[in-house]
Image (spheres, helix red, strand yellow):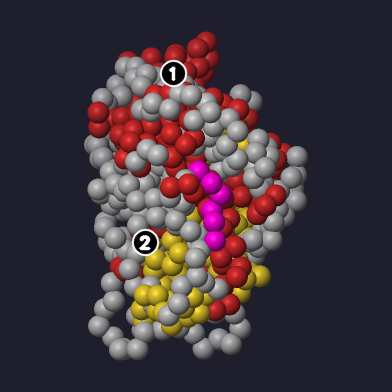
Amino acid sequence: MRFTSRRLVPFVLAAGLAGATCLGSSAVAAAPPGPPERPVVATDAGSVRGVDHGDYRTFAGVPYAAPPVGPLRWRSPAPVRPWSGVRDADRLGSACPQTPNGEVRGGSTNEDCLYLNVTVPRTDRHRPLPVVVWLHGGGFLTGTGSSYDAHRMAVRGQVVVVTVNYRLGIFGNFGYPGLPGSGDFGLADQQAALRWVQRNAGSFGGDRHNVTLAGESAGGMSTCTQLTSPSAAGLFAKAIVQSGACAVDFGKNAVYPGVDHFSPWISSADLQSAGRQDAAKLGCAQPARALSCLRGKPAAALLSANTDFQQVSYGTPLVPQRPVTALRQGRFHKVPVLQGHTRDEMRAFVATLQHQQPITADSYRALLRDTFGDRARQWATVYSPATYGTPALAWAALNTDRVFACPTLATDRLLARQTPTYAYEFADRQAPNVGYPESPQLPLGAAHATELPYLFDLGGRHARFTAAQDALAGQMVDYWTAFAHTGAPNARDLPRWPRMSTGDTAPYVQQFNTGPGGIHRADFLTDHHCRLWSQG
């Protein structure tokens, strides 16, 4: 059971969020019957007219940078051209170029995509509200900010929420020798959006001095990376990292059997080498003319090489060091951080494999031998199918611990040395399926991205929750927005969430589940065998 094509990597990496948002376009695009007068807000580029939904207002498809088309392809985001009059902000901007997927059904070839969406609660408060800037996931290949209907977070938490599109794949992460900004165009877009927030938050009732940068999966990895970017200094005051810690690393066979080690981060030198190779494949081999040749290609042609550019680059002016190295050296923005993951992250990834070619007892043993060599028997004992129920569940548990849980805990501890850090684990194993294949041998549990419906109405639809899950969703929104307000995720009527202490032998991780006592302290080191993984 070996699959060696690297083309399988992005599908699995993007599957969590692509499936999670397969419910259609966000409800903020539609203007329901209501008051005839629509809200108008003045931005630094011109006025925008939004939609009044009663207890909240939305402003969709607001440009934060010039369209990165023609000569602006693979350049740092340029300023928006100001407009006169009032621009309608009741329609979503295009998703950035991507191949068809569960979230953007038909894909996109439209590079005019640098738009954001603002959700503002109706409030009697006279003080500016905290601002949450949300970065979507999708393996740096798929997704769009408009999939996240943020009205529950905005209204219940009394925060302004901004969801952002940023360049993806070959458009956001391409590198080539001599190309300024190589590999970091998507990250530069995110910073441009944050600068837009700094200039315009006050017009929407937000506090530019109290901005929380947040994201999940690739959005979480982006957020953690921005923590280490010198040019992001002062652009946000807090950070929320969901399933995207800087130490996340996909070891051999973790993404898919036959796929070697894979990191979401790539050195600038390696990326530029890959860019040179792909330029030749795309018919632009001459170095002196390669970039002009590539800029002349239609977006659809470039998408054929999209999967080779699903990593963000370091060793650049924007990201000088590999982010986890920067954390180890204390070179990051010392802002409060809320960080965590789901209890069964890798069941989402294994579900795809299980759907295509189920993991049997024999193939599980083969995977262990190929992955760990002489130590295979040790890991077979720790992650026994008899303990976990099936070989597929054992393999998923092993990789959840190896890829997400223990690296996230390690990142928590690095952060906690120098800044307030709050660690969590989402553990509702009855969470609604967000679009993954299902198998009797592999219950999805609290898989990758399953916490998202508790915070957002994905695609504009509230998830089919039980009463207990609805209550948990409210509590999670309360924690997240309390953190946005104060830098500590604690408020009245919520179980207390202590910050992580570097001196703890069993560090405090807040676990989220339903029912009485569902929010409690998790025995994280035992549950995820992190002491063993720390020994290599």
Q: Is residue 265 above or below residue 241?
A: above
**Percent of width and height locating residue 222:** 54, 47
Q: Which residue is mark 2?
A: 93
Q: Residue at x 41, y 79 (%)?
A: 86
For this view, does 421 lie left or right of residue 400?
Answer: right
Asked whether disc 2 touches disc 1, contact meaning CB atoms under 8 Å apart, the reply is: no
Q: Residue at x 54, y 79 (%)?
A: 203
The residue lying toward the viewer, choosing from 105 and 432, is 105
* Residues packed near mark 1 inside 10 Å, few (<14), some (14 to 19) or many (20 plus): some
Q: Is residue 307 above or below residue 340?
A: above
Secondary structure type for disc 2: loop
The residue lying toward the viewer, choosing from 296 and 301, is 296
Q: Is residue 199 above or below residue 32?
A: above
Magenta stretch bounds: 74-79
The residue lying toward the viewer, choosing from 245 and 68, is 68
Q: CA distance from mark 2 to mark 1?
A: 46 Å
Q: Which residue is mark 1?
A: 368
**Percent of width and height locating residue 209:** 66, 70
Q: Amino acid at mark 1?
A: Leu
